[in-house]
Image (cartoon, rainbow, N blue to C red):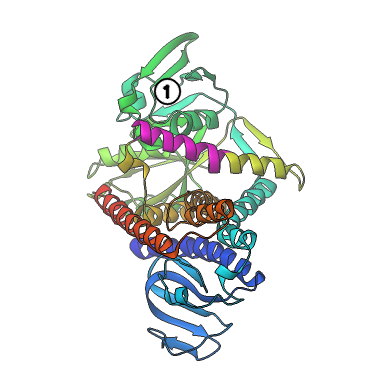
């Protein structure tokens, strides 16, 4: 069931991104009076499709069919991309039949360079617009809420933070020269801004400042779970109780707040999960709060190291809440686009090149995207669409890179044509397209392999 859910959300995410990107090319081509012969979701052999000439059909389209100004909307075998085939263009379809014929008014090659530039960049523009509107929607309706604390609530004993000397109730004041005031600043500093770099963390413990140094080799593949910190003021709440599991016999209900497990105060979901795993098949005491009434019951975690509850966290400490209107949300959205779509991407690429972040850890393919899609969906609608926006920006940046077979590669050839006032020879275009496609395919196979072995 979990596998089916993961595949379902992956297809939704890929479907949205592919449709938006290819629709950009499609609508720009149509607006420029070019013929868009194919609009495909997926690559490889045609599974099924529809066009106005012969209607709905399965399998390969009869080569004798003349679509004229109509488009064949199709689904292909491999749902890891898509394409729009525009008449008179050297693209991933590798169609070369038109080369020895006179250019026709509806062909890509017959249009002015500026129109072709719009068509070739329209997919990237649509991906950026999708990200913009999602960020704008989230900003407008959710605003920005930050945990106004830098006090540590829980430190996992199996984590890098605990190994480095950070303890519960420590106050994090500074990371790598940046003053820290909120929990969001801790997360962004450790997991984004300084990922793969050595960390110098200044903490205050019982009124005394202490410097903690974490070397570079230990931060390379850091995640929130492996770092092991949770903020103060966190309550662990029962989201659901599964039937016929150990917890169902205790009387605990959805909405109850866990106070302690085996007389250890619970300060985070991660802490409770670790205690449950450590006490598998052992009778333990569970204490919780229900609307002000303290309740307790013995519970014995099963051999699967679980008691049968779904958990969530509730923050009860001070917060900073910023609300936005239809006007003030615009600059905030542009700032998010720049930060998540530009700054973080460029920093990550630089760190990969420098070796600060292992290539295998930094690059994710269909398997990792599928897993992340399902995880983001578990966080609710806003979490899911935020993930779609981040992925859309990544897709836009990757596609605009000046590499053959990508939109950026086509754009470079158009720029060269504009500079030298003549098109790049078709043989050169075809050679570059083949080479780029083979390299991208090999890269994709490597990424998929890396995804699979990283699951072990």
Asked if residue 241 can be seen in this view, the reply is no
Residue 428 falls within the magenta-colored stretch:
no
Front one among 141 and 36: 36
Q: Is residue 306 left or right of residue 139?
A: left
Q: Is residue 324 left or right of residue 46?
A: right
**Magenta residues (range):** 339-357
Q: Is residue 113 left or right of residue 163?
A: right
At which x and y percent is residue 208? 47, 8
At which x and y percent is residue 27? 62, 69
Q: Secondary structure at mark 1?
A: loop
Residue 341 falls within the magenta-colored stretch:
yes
Asked if residue 434 can be seen in this view, the reply is yes
At which x and y percent is residue 307? 32, 49
Residue at the farthest front position: 421
Q: Is residue 413 above or below residue 273?
A: below
Q: Is residue 54 above or below residue 280?
A: below
Q: Residue at x 47, y 9 (%)?
A: 209
Q: Magenta segment, principal secondary structure?
A: helix
- Which residue matches tag 1? 168
At which x and y percent is residue 197? 39, 26
Q: Is residue 158 above or below residue 396?
A: above
Q: Residue at x 42, y 55 (%)?
A: 404
Residue at the farthest top position: 208
Few, some or many C-alpha atoms within 10 Å of disc 1 (few <14, some 14-19, many ≥20)?
Answer: some
């Amino acid at each position: 069931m979990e596998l089916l859910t993961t595949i379902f959300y992956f297809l939704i995410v890929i479907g949205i991104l592919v449709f938006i990107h290819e629709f950009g090319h499609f609508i720009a081509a149509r607006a420029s009076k070019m013929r868009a012969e194919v609009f495909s979701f997926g690559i490889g052999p045609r599974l099924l499709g529809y066009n106005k000439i012969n209607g709905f059909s399965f399998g390969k389209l009869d080569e004798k069919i003349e679509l004229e100004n109509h488009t064949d909307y199709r689904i292909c075998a491999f749902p890891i991309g898509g394409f729009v085939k525009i008449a008179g263009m050297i693209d991933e379809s590798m169609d070369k039949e038109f080369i020895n014929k006179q250019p026709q008014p509806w062909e890509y090659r017959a249009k002015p360079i500026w129109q072709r530039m719009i068509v070739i960049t329209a997919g990237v523009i649509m991906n950026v617009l999708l990200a913009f509107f999602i960020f704008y929607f989230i900003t407008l309706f959710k605003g920005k809420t930050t945990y106004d604390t830098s006090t540590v609530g829980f430190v996992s004993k199996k984590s890098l933070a605990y190994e480095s000397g950070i303890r519960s109730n420590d106050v994090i004041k500074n990371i790598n020269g940046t003053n820290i005031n909120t929990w969001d600043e801790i997360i962004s500093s450790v997991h984004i801004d300084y990922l793969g770099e050595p960390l110098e963390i200044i903490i205050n413990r019982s009124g005394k400042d202490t410097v903690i140094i974490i070397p570079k080799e230990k931060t390379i593949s850091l995640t929130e779970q492996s770092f092991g910190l949770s903020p103060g003021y966190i309550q662990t709440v029962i989201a659901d109780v599964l039937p016929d599991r150990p917890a169902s016999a205790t009387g605990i209900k959805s909405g109850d707040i866990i106070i302690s497990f085996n007389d250890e105060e619970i300060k985070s979901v991660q802490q409770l999960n670790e205690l449950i795993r450590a006490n598998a098949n052992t009778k333990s005491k569970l204490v919780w709060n229900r609307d002000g009434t303290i309740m307790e019951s013995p519970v014995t975690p099963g051999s699967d190291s679980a008691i049968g509850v779904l958990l969530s966290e509730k923050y009860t400490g001070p917060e900073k809440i910023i609300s936005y209107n239809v006007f003030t949300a615009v600059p905030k959205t542009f700032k998010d686009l720049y930060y998540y779509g530009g700054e973080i991407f460029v920093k990550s690429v630089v760190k990969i090149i420098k070796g600060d972040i292992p290539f295998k850890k930094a690059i994710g393919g269909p398997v990792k995207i599928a897993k992340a899609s399902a995880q983001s969906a578990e966080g609710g609608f806003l979490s899911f669409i935020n993930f779609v926006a981040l992925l859309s920006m990544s897709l836009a940046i990757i596609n605009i890179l000046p590499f053959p077979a990508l939109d950026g590669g086509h754009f470079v050839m158009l720029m060269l044509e504009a500079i030298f006032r003549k098109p790049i020879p078709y043989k050169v275009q075809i050679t570059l397209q083949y080479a780029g496609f083979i390299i991208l395919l090999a890269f994709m196979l490597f990424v998929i392999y890396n995804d699979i072995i990283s699951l072990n």
